[in-house]
Image (cartoon, rainbow, N blue to C red):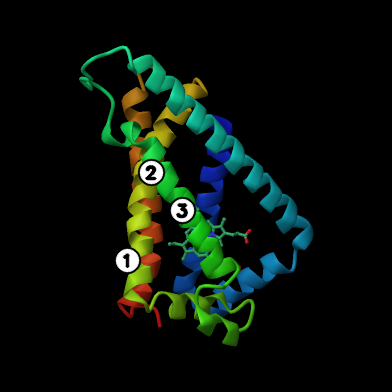
């Protein structure tokens, strides 16, 4: 789970860095999108790795959840002492992320949810984002989904370090606040994109 989590989290960071080019204008963002589309020998193997990681991550997550439930089933009353809200809801936040990714692929990669995308060039990602986030419903859905992403990453990042043995009593507090900060930065960075378009900051 931890290794596939690193790969998926790494993708989310790189993807965010690419998407933030929106703030540098259409030329920069579209040139970046064009360079990805021009390198299918790189894109398709990366997509295959990403899909494999997603399937492994999902399978491990469900297995872990069932195992935890079986172990906790013996207790009549649950009294959480250290488990945070995000750690107790990883299956829920992960499921919302899966639904988000399926919608997101239909929206921006397959372009089948918005008829207006048919009129713009395949690598005019800037225009696609500007059109896509004019809808309040779409913007709201993206912003809400990013709250779930933040919660998922919040626990994911700290438990990942523990699984990989990169923790220790002396610096656990620093690692967990570093994980929280990173999760929040990723969440806010992603939220800023639909909101900036919807609020007219990016036109
Ligand atoms: C709210 C912020 C986000 C924006 C504005 C955004 C935007 C985009 C756009 C424009 C594309 C299509 C790029 C192209 O075809 O040239 C795309 C693809 C994709 N996005 Fe996002 N994205 C966001 C967040 C996320 C998140 C949080 C995830 C994962 C949890 C994600 C996963 C993906 C995946 C898997 C693809 C397909 C990549 C491929 O073509 O192989 N995105 N995104």
**Front one among 116 and 27:** 116
Label 1 CA crowd tier, 10 Å (few <14, some 14–19, many 20+): some
Determine whether the residue tagged by mark 1 lies in a helix, strand or loop: helix
Alpha-carbon distance for marks 3 and 2?
A: 10 Å
* Above or below, comparing residue 22 to residue 77 in the picture: below
Drawn side of residue 142 relative to residue 5, left or right: left
Residue at the image point whose x is 43% and y is 35% from the top? 157
Alpha-carbon distance for marks 1 and 3?
A: 15 Å
What label does residue 140 carry, if any? Answer: 1
Please provide percent x and percent y for residue 107: 52, 68
Q: Which residue is mark 2?
A: 93
Residue at the image point whose x is 32% and y is 57% from the top? 144
Q: Quadrant of residue 139?
A: bottom left
The first of marks 2 and 1 along the sequence is: 2
**Front one among 85 and 25:** 85
Q: Which quadrant holds the C terminus?
A: bottom left
Specify whether residue 169 is in view.
no
Please provide percent x and percent y for residue 169: 35, 16
Q: Which quadrant holds the N terminus?
A: top right
Label 2 CA crowd tier, 10 Å (few <14, some 14–19, many 20+): many
**Front one among 108 and 182:** 108
Q: Residue furthest top?
A: 74
Residue at the image point whose x is 35% and y is 23% from the top? 172
In this view, the mark in front (1 or 3):
3
* Above or below, comparing residue 16 to residue 72 in the picture: below
Q: Which residue is mark 3?
A: 99
Please provide percent x and percent y for residue 95: 43, 45
* Above or below, comparing residue 93 to residue 75 in the picture: below
Label 3 CA crowd tier, 10 Å (few <14, some 14–19, many 20+): few
Q: Quadrant of residue 84?
A: top left
């Amino acid at each position: 789970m931890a290794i596939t989590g690193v790969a998926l989290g790494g993708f989310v960071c790189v993807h965010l860095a690419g998407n933030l080019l929106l703030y540098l204008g259409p030329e920069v963002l579209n040139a970046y999108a064009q360079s990805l589309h021009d390198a299918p020998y790189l894109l398709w193997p990366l997509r295959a790795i990403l899909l494999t990681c997603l399937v492994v991550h999902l399978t491990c997550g469900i297995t872990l959840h069932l195992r935890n439930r079986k172990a906790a089933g013996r207790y009549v009353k649950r009294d959480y002492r250290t488990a945070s809200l995000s750690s107790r809801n990883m299956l829920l936040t992960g499921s919302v992320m899966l639904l988000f990714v399926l919608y997101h692929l239909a929206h921006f990669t397959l372009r089948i949810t918005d008829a207006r995308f048919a009129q713009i060039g395949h690598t005019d990602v800037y225009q696609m984002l500007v059109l896509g986030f004019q809808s309040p419903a779409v913007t709201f859905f993206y912003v809400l989904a990013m709250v779930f992403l933040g919660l998922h990453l919040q626990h994911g990042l700290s438990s990942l370090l523990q699984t990989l043995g990169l923790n220790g009593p002396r610096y656990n507090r620093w690692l967990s606040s570093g994980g929280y900060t990173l999760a929040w930065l990723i969440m806010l960075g992603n939220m800023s994109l639909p909101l900036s378009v919807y609020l007219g900051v990016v036109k």
